[in-house]
Amino acid sequence: MRVEPSSTQAIPAVAEVPRHVAIIMDGNGRWATRRFLPRVAGHQRGAEAVREAVRTCVERGIEYLTLFAFSSENWRRPAEEVAVLMQLFRMVLEQEVAKLHVNGVRLKVVGDLSRFDTRIVELIRRGEARTARNRRLTLTICANYGGRWDVVQATHRMLTDRPELATSFTEADLAPYLAMAHAPEPDLFIRTGGEQRISNFLIWQLAYTELYFTDTYWPDFDGRTLDEAIASYRRRERRFGQTSEQVREGRRAAQALPGAVTPLPDA
Ligand code: IPE
Ligand code: IPE
Ligand code: MG
């Protein structure tokens, strides 16, 4: 598998529209509570907001959308809420894969799938296989995912494959084993629901991602919320450790040679 350049190994090209948007879809419960509805109603509306997010990303030309659906810590919730979330995940997989496929969306599900029931795992595998050749948008759902789980599972798999690396390995050795190896690092991170934390999301991949927090609850997320986040992203200067002057010089060079990635000088 070809692994995308790492932001700590090379300076990525920066486009006007983020190539990869990663979202913590938070605030479903509070959205429902505010309306005197059970939390599950918020999750149901949240699933509809996912549809809207996928559609908008396709329209805006975003290549990768990654959504945090269930964290490795969400098992701590009441059993009934976990059961509802699993049921909803299963229904979404049953109902949406065909539509994703028609719309050219490639589906990926990443996380520790060993705790899901076999029906869900089967739906995931079938959905991924069916959509594997689609290229308009790659939709990655993080389910029973945790950033720390990811780093540990990647290290474990790498050392199983290549035991000779036990005493010394590099970022580049580990990269192909990370759960998000199929995608470039996120350019833009969005968290809805007002909290300003990462909650064990893509801790490795967010190293140089631009962070955007909004009070909007996930069920209310729409094209306008996404456009506001993109507008904020466009106002940022992504320096990747360099100075402003170097960034401007790099941009001039990139205009002359589109798609160029500037390698870091040897240390
Ligand atoms: C996010 O919404 C959905 C999941 C974590 C599955 P929440 O359920 O966390 O909603 P709040 O934060 O309680 O409002
Ligand atoms: C993060 O939201 C996980 C998902 C959105 C799936 P949480 O609601 O679980 O995060 P905390 O507990 O408030 O940090
Ligand atoms: Mg929450």
Image (cartoon, helix red, strand yellow):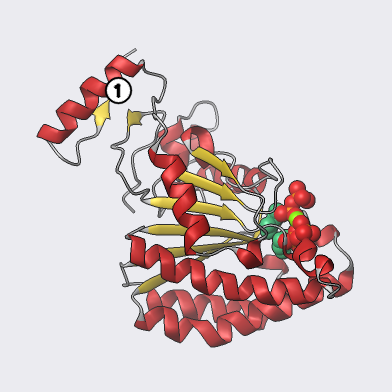
Q: Which residue does the image show at 34% across and 54% down from the upper left? A: 1
Tell me where residue 5 sits by quadrant.
Answer: top left
**62 vs 9, nearest the viewer:** 62
**230 vs 141, nearest the viewer:** 230
Left or right: where 24 falls relative to 234 = right
- The answer to whether any part of residue 50 appears in the image is yes
**247 vs 215, nearest the viewer:** 215
Q: Which residue does the image show at 42% across and 20% down from the upper left? A: 241
**Quadrant showing the C terminus:** top left
Picture coordinates of residue 262, whole percent (x, y): 24, 28
Q: Which residue does the image show at 36% across and 57% down from the upper left? A: 62
Q: Secondary structure at mark 1?
A: helix
Quadrant field for ligand 3: bottom right
Does 33 sit above or below residue 127? Answer: above
Picture coordinates of residue 254, whole percent (x, y): 18, 32
Picture coordinates of residue 160, whole percent (x, y): 54, 47
Picture coordinates of residue 245, whole percent (x, y): 29, 15
- What residue did someone put label 1 on? 247
